[in-house]
Amino acid sequence: MTKLKLLSIAGLTSAVLAISAVAFAADGPHDKAIKARQAMFQSYSFNIEILGAMAKEKRPYDAEVAAEAANNLSAAANFGQSQMWPQGSDNATEGNARTRALPAIWETFPAITDKGEALKTAVAALVPVAGNGLGALQSAMNDVGASCKGCHDDYRAEKK
């Protein structure tokens, strides 16, 4: 190998290590928990958007797709979350700019667990009927939407 190639490889390796060190140092103590819960909420959102579009007749109703999305939503809603919500992983804590979680989540605990249970209950009622026709889906989606709104209104900051 030529000296120039060795210097290039060494320079590239140093740059990658420096970037990695900066990226690692920029991580806050709760970044993994925040990322995990955001991934869970993305799954909620993806499936609710499918179901909501059908319920609002903005997408053709498809019983098989509706049933699948309802089952996916149920799996996500019943996912264990105990490690995703550490105290201090709210948007008011320095270094947590990527979250919209309000400090009220921890200030009112365990009251927020009632909101999570409302979602689980609404989704449990949705699962057996989502594939049984548009009317059944529409009726069940009202409770799912209300449970989401109940948590968002009290515990999630608006988008900036």
Image (spheres, grey):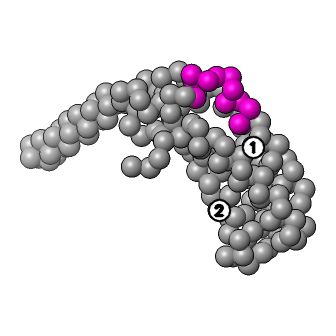
Q: CA distance from mark 2 to mark 1?
A: 15 Å
Query: As shown in the figure, which amino acid type bears the numbered disc 1?
Result: Leu
Q: Amino acid at mark 2?
A: Glu
Residue at 68% across / 23% down in the picture? 110
Q: Nearer the viewer, residue 45 or 83?
A: 45
Q: Quadrant of residue 75?
A: top right
In the image, residue 72 lies at what x, y percent?
74, 53
> Is 119 drawn above or below residue 20 in the view shown?
below
Q: Is residue 37 left or right of residue 142?
A: left
Q: Quadrant of residue 45?
A: bottom right
Mark 1 falls on what kind of element?
helix
Rendered residue at 43%/23% (across/down): 29
- Residue 76 can be seen, yes or no: no
Residue drawn at (46%, 38%) of the image = 99
Residue appearing at x 77%, y 57% in the figure: 142
Q: Which mark is residue 35?
A: none
Depth check, front residue: 82 or 97: 97
Tell me where the magenta segment starts and ends, as one range: 105-116
How many discs appear?
A: 2
Image coords of residue 73 (percent x, y): 73, 51
Residue extending farthest to the left is 3
In the image, which disc is placed on residue 49? 2
User: Label 2's element?
Assistant: helix
Q: Nearer the viewer, residue 157 or 26?
A: 157
Where is residue 150? Give x, y as percent: 66, 43
Residue highlighted by disc 1: 119
Q: Horizontal and vertical percent for residue 10?
A: 18, 38
Tag nearer the camera, 2 or 1: 1
